[in-house]
Each structure stands twice: as structure tokens, then as C-alpha cells.
Image (cartoon, grey):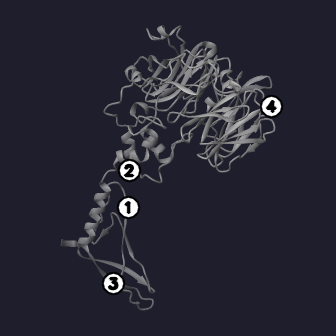
Amino acid sequence: MGGRWSGVRLRFSRMRNKAAPAFFDAGSRIRGFRLPRFPNGSSYKMAVHPRTAHRPPKNRVFQRSVRIGGTALLATLCTMAAAAQEPPDAAALYREHCSECHGAGRLGAMGPALLPQNLKRLSRNRAAEVIRNGAPATQMPAFHDRLDSAAIDSLVEYIYTPLKRIPAWGVEQMRASHVVYHPPGSLPPKPRFSADLQNLFVVVELGDHHATLLDGDTFTPIHRFPTRFALHGGPKYSNGGRYVFFASRDGWISKFDIYNLEYVAEIRAGINSRNVAVSADGRYVMVANYLPHTLVLLDGSDLAPLRIIPASDGNGHSSRVSAVYAAEPRNSFIVALKDIPELWEIPYPADAARAGAGPLPIRRIRTSSYLDDFFINQEYTLVIGTSRDGSSQVVDLEQGKVTHTLDLPGMPHLGSGISWIYRGRPVLATPNMKHGIVSVVDMTSWKTIRRIETLGPGFFMRSHENTPYAWVDVFFGPNRDAVHVIDKRTLEIVKTLRPAPGKTSAHVEFTRDGTRALLSIWDPDGAVIVYDSRTLKELKRIPMRKPSGKYNVHNKLSRSAGTSH
């Protein structure tokens, strides 16, 4: 190649025996030729150094010519430019960085499904920001140190591209997955072990996807058994605590007989599920799904599918289901929708035959914003809901409307809220997943009466009727190993515990009588730590594999004000 690149001469200055190379940026001109710019904006510098290092005359500036091999330089720049223009392989990036949590097919696993219909509330710009910087109050990490802007943009485009085909998940698929290990009535009605059946705990161990049945008097494990992958939403008890129901993020619902230490039935009710609710009499199980956008009603005896309820507003808009809870005093299920500003109440069917025939009556209550999380008062007459946009509201189930808005900054975790009587008035206390505060709200005036500063954002808050203390973790941030103990009488932090420095401490549950508090160390080599709930002294450590939630039979069935329902 000849022309202007054959014999380009670049001049540089050298003074006092110290060479100073000449630098040229993309777009610079060199003797009439402009160095190319890369289409994606990537930059580079070209340096030219002297070939010789002869000492120049003192205090004299001189010039030396250096001949550049123009053909080699241009070939190198063209190669770099071609590489810069090659678009990132979005599918490969997804497999490497996203599939473990969100599923190989983007259908959800530990994390939610990444499909256009599930991302309606998330703009593309916001999605790029989440990939770059992570999402607060979730397990979504930041990727800014691993992915450049082009890679992030390609991932955003990828997850907003519709799948050619979303797997169907209807009654036919559910029935194909349905397994009854022990038909109803085939197992003995007496437990195979000796313990206070109302003071048992089920401890979920996320480290290796197991659960442990724990004696709440002796704190010795009775039985450890495998679970489905990534349980979520908390197990639910029925029939006086004989049965416990689990929901996994990938849609599996499992029914376990605690008396006989055996699974009795399983079914896959969805592709990506949120939680499960069980009617007080154990006849019905309701499943909340992210994908497909449905509620699924199951027979509580053997998990046979009875009814699929589309989560839609009747005008062509469908929604993920945030959560479903059983409202025992009302004989109904309460349902929060994530993409439609409505709260639903669905009465329990009179019998299974009616549940499978004809539409179920749905009471729709219009809300002022979406309900991403919510708390139900002890009487099940009020739903306090919050949205990720920062709005909070009170829905009166008797009046069927929103009656108040709340001043709750950040992202309160109302699903982990608790209540008690403070100076003669009921109060609601909630941790916050964005700010280091616990908000205490008067449930009569709906005014925030105290914001208790903590060492960082928290996730779980728990108490018991028989203890003066409420416990709240610092789940997010550098102080995740801390747990605060708050005096419910003064609304002051009286002690901060750090039972395992450097490891996450979270989720407290109490024994039936409230005299012992059990705390989890969320680590592969973790433990459940037992405390005296009055003196706050450690009594015992039980090694476990990343124990998360612990669920006491009595506290759940009695709807203790100190725990979630």
C-alpha cells in the first residue's frame, strides 16, 4: 500500500535527555490522515517512540524523524475496528451470567422469569440500570465490573424479545406432573415420634434444598428431608399441624405428612410461582403464579387441580400474582396483583365439586397503585399494601375501598410486618429494604409515630405476645451480621447482637410460649441459634446448611401477631 501512509514522518520533542513520546487519539490527524473512530465509541491511543537515544545538545530542542510502517499500522487499526463492530452474543452472555438464577429458557428459577409480559412495569432504561448496578432488596447483583455498556444493552434487548413459544401450563400439564405417593387416609393418624406437636418447627435449609423438623422443646432435629429447588413464600400448615405445604419458585407444590415423615403428594402448578395459601380447614390450596399469569386452586387432600383462574382485569390485561393468603376469619383467599391495581377476595368454594364447575366469584377492589407487598391486620378486615414506587395504602375489606395513604419511605417490607399494643393503641411495625429504619405506624390514625434508625436496610421482623422485645435484622449491606432487639414498650433499640461476625444473621421465630427465640445464620456452614428471649443470652447452636426461615406450628396456626401469616 502506497500513498500518504508510505513514509509518514511524525515529529516529537526531546529535552534534557528525557524522551517524550507523541500520543495520538482516535480521530486525530497525522499528516492529513484521520485515525478511524470505532462505531461503539471505544477509544485508543497510539504512541510513537524514538528509535535512538542519542544525548541532545544541552538546552537545545531538536527534531528527529521516525518512519512508520504504514501498512502494518493500518492493518492493525482495521482489525481493531472490525473487532469493535462485532456485536456481543446476547444468548451467550445470558447463559453465562443470568441462567443460573432466571432459568436457561428465561422462564424463572431462583429469580423471576425474564419475558416481556413479566417486565411491563420495568422500562428498558431501568432494566439496563438494574443489570449495571443491581437491584436493592433483592439477590440481583451488579454487573458493571463484568459487562460493558454494549453487553448490557444486548442483554436488555434479549430479555425484552418474546420467546417463539412460551410453554403451555394448563390442567393437562398439571395432571401429567401430579404424583400421589400416599392416597388420603392410607397413612397412620398418629405421629412416629414423641414431641409437643404444637411446638415443632420446620426449618428451611437453602444451602442444599432440605428441610429439618425440629423439636421446639429440646431443640434436637427429628427428621431431615429433601425439598424441591428454591422454596419460597414460607410453608403453610393444615389439619392441626399434621400436614405442611411447600411452594418452590419453579412451580412445584408439595404436601408433607409430619406425623409419618413422608411426602404424600406433589404437583407442578406453574412455571414460576410465588407462594401458596391453605384454607383453614385444609380443603383447598391456592397457588400464586408469576408465569403463567394465573391462580391455581388445588384439592387440599391430594393436590389434584380443581380450577385455573386467569389473573386479568377482563379488558385484555393480565398480571403476575404478587401473593395469596388465606383469610381464615373470612373463609376466603386474599390476592394481590402485581401488574393490575386491584385486590381480590375469593371465597372458599362450598365443596370440591363446585370448585371445579362454573366460575368462582371474585370480589375486585380497586387500589390506588400496584400491591407488591402487603400486611393483613389480626381481624382480617384491613390490608396495608405497598408498591415499589414508594406508595402505601390501607384497603378496608369491609368497605371495599382504599381509605388511607401512609407515609412510609423507601421500600417497607410489609409482608414481614408485625403488630402489638403500644400505649393502648394497636401499632404496625415494618422493616425497610431500602433504608436503615423501622417504621412504627398507629393503626387508628395511620400516622407514623416513630422511625427507629438501624444499621442498615432489613428484611425480617418478628416478636411474640409473651415477650417485650421485637427483633429485626440488618439483611442488606456491610452490617448484615447484626440483629437489633427493640423494646416494644419504649420503641428503643436495647441491644444489637452479632452472633457470627461477617455472616448474615436473619429471620427470628419464637417457640410456642415465646420464651425462646431462634435466629438463622444464612451461610452454607450456618446454624440456628437459640436465645433466651428474656435475657437475650445464647443457649444453643444447631449446625445447618444455610437455614433461612423457621416456622413454628402453633404460632402459624394461631396467627400470632408477632409473625407473618
SS of the residue under disc 4: loop
**Along the polypeptide, which appears first: circle 3 or circle 1?**
1
Disc 3 versus disc 1: nearer the observer? 1
Label 2, label 3: how many angstroms apart (C-alpha)? 42 Å
Disc number for residue 156: none
x%, y% of residue 31? Answer: 27, 72
Disc 1 versus disc 2: nearer the observer? 2
Q: Tell me: residue 295, above or below residue 398.
A: below
What residue is pinned by disc 4? 489
Disc number for residue 150: 2
Label 2, label 4: how many angstroms apart (C-alpha)? 54 Å
Q: Is residue 501 left or right of residue 276?
A: right
SS of the residue under disc 2: helix
Q: Sort mark 2 into few (<14), some (14-19) or many (20+) by Cα contacts within 10 Å.
A: few
SS of the residue under disc 1: loop
Three-letter amino acid code at the position of disc 2: Ala
**Along the polypeptide, which appears first: circle 3 or circle 4?**
3
Disc 2 versus disc 3: nearer the observer? 2
Q: Is residue 329 left or right of residue 28?
A: right
**Along the polypeptide, which appears first: circle 2 or circle 4?**
2
Tell me whether circle 1 and circle 4 mark residues in contact (CB < 8 Å): no
User: Could you say which is closer to the camera, residue 344 or residue 12?
Assistant: 344
User: Could you say which is closer to the camera, residue 268 or residue 331?
Assistant: 268
Q: Is residue 82 among what the camera can see? A: yes
The residue shown at (73%, 28%) is 464
What residue is pinned by disc 3? 64
Report the label total.
4
What residue is pinned by disc 1? 43
Disc 1 versus disc 4: nearer the observer? 4
Q: Quadrant of the N terminus?
A: bottom left
Label 3, label 4: how many angstroms apart (C-alpha)? 84 Å
